[in-house]
Amino acid sequence: MNNKPLKRSQEMQILSRDHHFGLLFTWKIKQGINKKVDSLRMKDYVNFFWNQHLKDHFLDEEVLLFNRFSSEELCIQAKKDHQQIIDLIERVNAASQGDYAVYEKLFTFLDQHIRFEERVVFPHLEVIIPESVLTSIGHFLEKHHQDFVDDFKDEFWK
């Protein structure tokens, strides 16, 4: 398998950086499960990450990319994935204490989704999006995007 780093267009690099934070999130949840951390502590982090980062990231992707190319099968799938991740977060919030299975489903699915976007969806969109549109997306992200700051106080993953 080819493990060369993916080259992302400058305009899309902000969204790829967001994906890095998503992968760190999945790693932290996995560490919490391995350490048998109280699931309520992890639930607080899931909600923190959703509210402080992931919700806005999904909105950016959908408005700037997926809705513009709504007939593209890859965009349809990415939006379905977003809804499935939201559903999994709701299941985390409804889960009883100690139910690690739903956390495992969340981190596994989110990890797969991020890799799907990075390896399949984004490269495809970078080919089909006209350069002028890609440039306007990049300018919008530069002006309006807020970098995620993970200042969650309970570092349960350590």
Image (cartoon, rainbow, N blue to C red):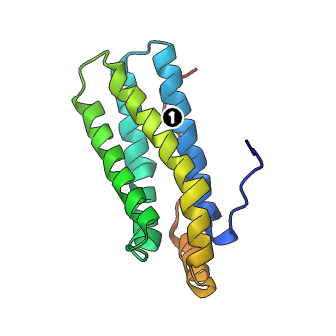
Location of residue 23 (image quadrant):
top right
* Residue 104 visible to the viewer: yes
Q: In front here: 143 or 25?
A: 25
The residue positioned 35% from the left and 22% from the top of the image is 101
Q: What residue type is labelled 1?
A: Thr
Image: 53 above or below 37: below
**Placement of 89 over or under 134, stated as above or below:** above
> Residue furthest toward the bottom?
132
Q: Answer with the quarter of the image where residue 3 lies.
A: top right
What residue is drawn where x is 42% and y is 77%? 68
Element type at mark 1: helix
Give the number of callouts.
1
Q: In which quarter of the image is the C terminus?
A: top right
Q: Residue at x 57, y 63 (%)?
A: 122
Q: Position of residue 126 (x, y in %)?
A: 61, 72
Answer whether residue 148 is visible to the viewer in this image: no
Q: Where, quadrant-wise, is the N terminus in this rendering?
A: top right
Quick check: 138 above or below 48? below
Which residue lies at the image location 39% right of the left edge and 36% below the top edge?
46
Residue occupying the far top of the picture: 36
Which residue matches tag 1? Answer: 26
Residue 21 drawn at (x, y percent):
56, 45
- Residue 155 image point, x, y percent: 52, 25
